[in-house]
Image: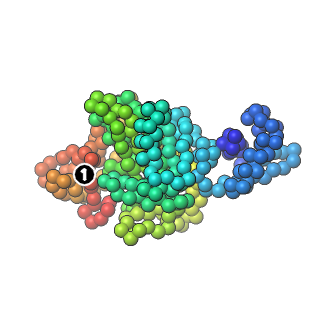
């Protein structure tokens, strides 16, 4: 019930009140039940003003991640229905895979697993992802698409596009994409994405798309301090006082993902998205170094094609680079 109360209070005009009678009628509960929920919300840190004969007004929302708070910020049709929230967990990707396998497929397409903290968060090639309490957004979307396994890797780029769009809309920061799936602001990484798939030769069992967003971090481990940043740090850098609601940002990113995913699904490629992706691609037009186990080379990044491959013009002409075990770095640094 707290979810619906928060949703109704948010939908009201700023400074206006929602009557207790309206809440009772909309939710089908008693005034006592509404009062108890209001009391619980206030104990969680929400500032709610109650005025006789006028009702309730939401004055302040704390930056907390909870099931009720996240659900009240959702405006999606199927992504995030349901939300599985954990105060602390090893890894949302691991939990999503565990749920998909142990429930014999009953955990549904679009389920989102969210944690306030991960103890074993990880990124590409097994790297650790720093995930302490109260600082970031760590979540995984479980997908069960009817697509060819060969087309699944492009979902990582779809998620990158959605995350960059969500950050730009909520914060106003100029978030870009470092191919294939790092989100960067002012040349530093603020988001990591890890996609994992369970598949047979000709069909997909499930795909989990995990995302870690640095929101409130103010410092990072020495090994990544030169390349990592957070949304708060970048807002302060631009002279803006950070006031980011992680639940609101998560809700926006999920909305963006639903939008871009449905476009991708029509063709199972990026033919309708690659031009927009390239406008956010920070590598585009720059000299890059391709780190391939088969051999490194340098060239100029031209953008991606409809398969999500990075086009790099080198001494041997234009080559198409697939993600997998390949990394791309700037000639003089991370970007």
> Within the image, what quadrant is residue 43 found in?
bottom right
Q: Position of residue 10 (x, y in %)?
A: 68, 45
Q: Is residue 15 left or right of residue 121?
A: right
The residue most toward the bottom is: 222
Q: Which residue is drawn at 82% across and 42% down?
A: 32
- Label 1 environment density (alpha carbons within 10 Å; few <14, some 14–19, many ≥20): some
Nearest the camera: 259 or 301?
A: 259
The residue most toward the right is: 53
Q: In this view, does 17 lie to the left or right of 135?
A: right
**Residue 235 in view:** no
Q: Which residue is drawn at 61% across and 56% down?
A: 63
Q: Where is residue 184 in the image (x, y as percent from the top left)?
A: 40, 57
Nearest the camera: 136 or 14?
A: 136
* Picture layout, residue 146 above or below residue 334: above
Q: Could you tell me which quadrant the N terminus lies in?
A: top right
* Picture layout, residue 241 above or below residue 246: below
Nearest the camera: 142 or 255?
A: 142
Q: Position of residue 319 (x, y in %)?
A: 18, 46
Q: Position of residue 161 (x, y in %)?
A: 41, 45
Q: Could you tell me which quadrant the C terminus lies in?
A: bottom left
The residue most toward the front is: 102
* Picture layout, residue 325 above or below residue 186: above
Residue with the mark numbered 1: 326
Q: Is residue 286 left or right of residue 189?
A: left
């Amino acid at each position: 019930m707290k979810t619906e109360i928060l949703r109704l209070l948010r939908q009201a005009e700023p400074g206006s009140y929602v009557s207790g009678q309206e809440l009772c009628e909309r939710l089908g509960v008693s005034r006592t039940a509404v009062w108890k929920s209001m009391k619980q919300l206030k104990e969680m840190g929400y500032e709610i003003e109650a005025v006789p004969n006028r009702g309730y007004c939401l004055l302040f929302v704390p930056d907390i991640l909870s099931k009720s708070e996240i659900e009240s910020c959702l405006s999606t049709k199927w992504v995030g229905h349901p939300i599985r929230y954990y105060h602390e967990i090893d890894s949302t990707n691991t939990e999503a895979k565990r749920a998909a396998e142990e429930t014999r497929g009953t955990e549904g397409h679009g389920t989102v697993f969210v944690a306030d903290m991960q103890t074993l968060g990880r990124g590409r090639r097994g790297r650790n992802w720093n995930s302490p309490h109260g600082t970031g957004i760590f979540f995984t979307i479980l997908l069960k698409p009817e697509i060819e396994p060969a087309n699944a890797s492009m979902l990582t780029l779809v998620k990158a596009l959605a995350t960059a769009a969500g950050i730009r809309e909520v914060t106003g920061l100029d978030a870009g994409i470092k191919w294939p799936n790092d989100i960067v602001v002012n040349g530093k990484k603020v988001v990591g994405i890890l996609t994992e798939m369970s598949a047979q030769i000709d069909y997909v069992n499930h795909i989990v798309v995990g995302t870690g967003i640095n929101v409130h971090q103010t410092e990072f481990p020495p090994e990544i301090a030169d390349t990592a940043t957070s949304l708060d740090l970048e807002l302060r850098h631009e002279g803006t006082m950070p006031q980011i609601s992680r639940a609101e940002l998560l809700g926006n990113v999920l909305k963006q993902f639903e939008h871009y995913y449905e476009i991708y699904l029509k063709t199972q490629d990026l033919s309708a998205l690659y031009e927009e992706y390239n406008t956010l691609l920070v590598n585009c037009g720059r000299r890059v170094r391709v780190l391939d186990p088969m051999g490194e080379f340098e060239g100029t990044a031209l953008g991606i094609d409809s398969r999500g491959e990075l086009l790099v013009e080198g001494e041997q002409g234009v080559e198409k680079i697939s993600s997998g075990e390949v990394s791309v770095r700037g000639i003089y640094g991370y970007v």
